[in-house]
Image: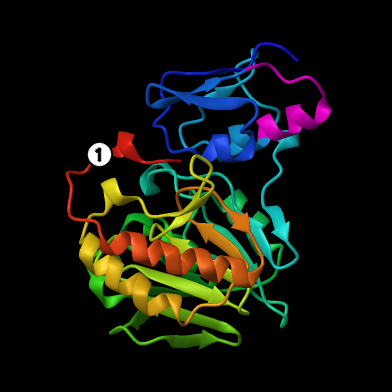
Amino acid sequence: MDGWFVDDRCVNCDAARQLAPELIGETDGRSRMLRQPRDAAEIRRLHAAAFACPTRSIRPASGRPDPARDPFPLPLDEAVLLCGHNSPRTAGANSYLLLRPSGTTMMIDTPRWSSELAARYAASGPVTDVLLTHRDHAAHGRRYADHFGARLWIHEGDLDAAPDADRVIRGLDPLEIGEGVTALPLPGHTRGSVLYLADDRYCFTGDSFYWSRTTGDLEIAESVTWYSVEELAGSLARAAGRLRFEWVLPGHGDRRRLDAGEMSRRLHALADRTRSLRPRPIDFTAVRW
């Protein structure tokens, strides 16, 4: 069980640490092993971390994790699976599968592309829609949508990142895009950022906000807000009164499930905190994962 290490390709995306936080930590802007696994359950968590890592930097002494222990897509709840296999072309962002009562599936943002992975994801049910939360996560969207015969969605504010999208979300009003699924434009991180709310339970936030293990609360990635933190403050203020959900499911940052009332309280508090912020230089090292 010894010999796991993190190689020097790590880009500090946090994906691996989300899956094995007791085994992998952060030092000087990159992941490092805190200790070696002690049992089979911890070895499983390290394999999940390894197959999520976009640079394949989490490795056993043999140099290659066991493909038979690849757990993805990994169920998070009865209707949501984590895709894993995060892509370097989306800065290592998480992506998800949302299972619908009809037996179909929606993909939110995109993992790395391969036909083998696409077949694995489609086994959960026919994929009808690929929902992009914003421009940074658009890579592979067209490839997956064409493979599945699915519709590709993006907001007009980020349309240049996916100009061949099949469906374009416009303006700021919520838009029902499927039974129980609503797109809510949330400009701030980028001009065309969108979150997707499903069943008043699951909130796919892209990079608009996330759960921070450091603060134990909802946070925004203030230091990597590309468009406007003032716009993001306004977006959060509008959204706080509209959203009801239990799961926060971001592209970057950790996931968390809380009672819907508690999540609402924390979202209102985040909106209040964000109103006091002003623009600052982009700094990836300042994100409070």
Residue 285 appears at what percent x and percent y? Answer: 32, 34
What predominant SS class does the magenta segment belong to? helix
Would residue 215 be found to the left or right of residue 158 on screen?
Answer: right
Q: In this figure, which residue is indicated by the disc labeled 1?
A: 283
Is 233 situated left or right of 174 in this image? left
Instruction: Name the foreground residue: 242 vs 137.
Output: 242
How many numbered discs? 1
Q: Which residues are magenta?
A: 35-47
In terms of image quadrants, where is residue 10? Answer: top left
Residue at 56 percent of width and 35 percent of height = 16
Callout 1 amino acid: Asp
Relative to 48, say whether 82 is above or below. below
Vertical order, 258 against 115 (above or below): below
Q: Is residue 162 left or right of residue 97?
A: left
Pointer 1: residues within 10 angstroms few (<14), some, or many (20+)? few
Residue 272, position in %: x, y?
Answer: 35, 65
Secondary structure at badge 1 equals loop
Residue 163 in sight from this viewpoint: no
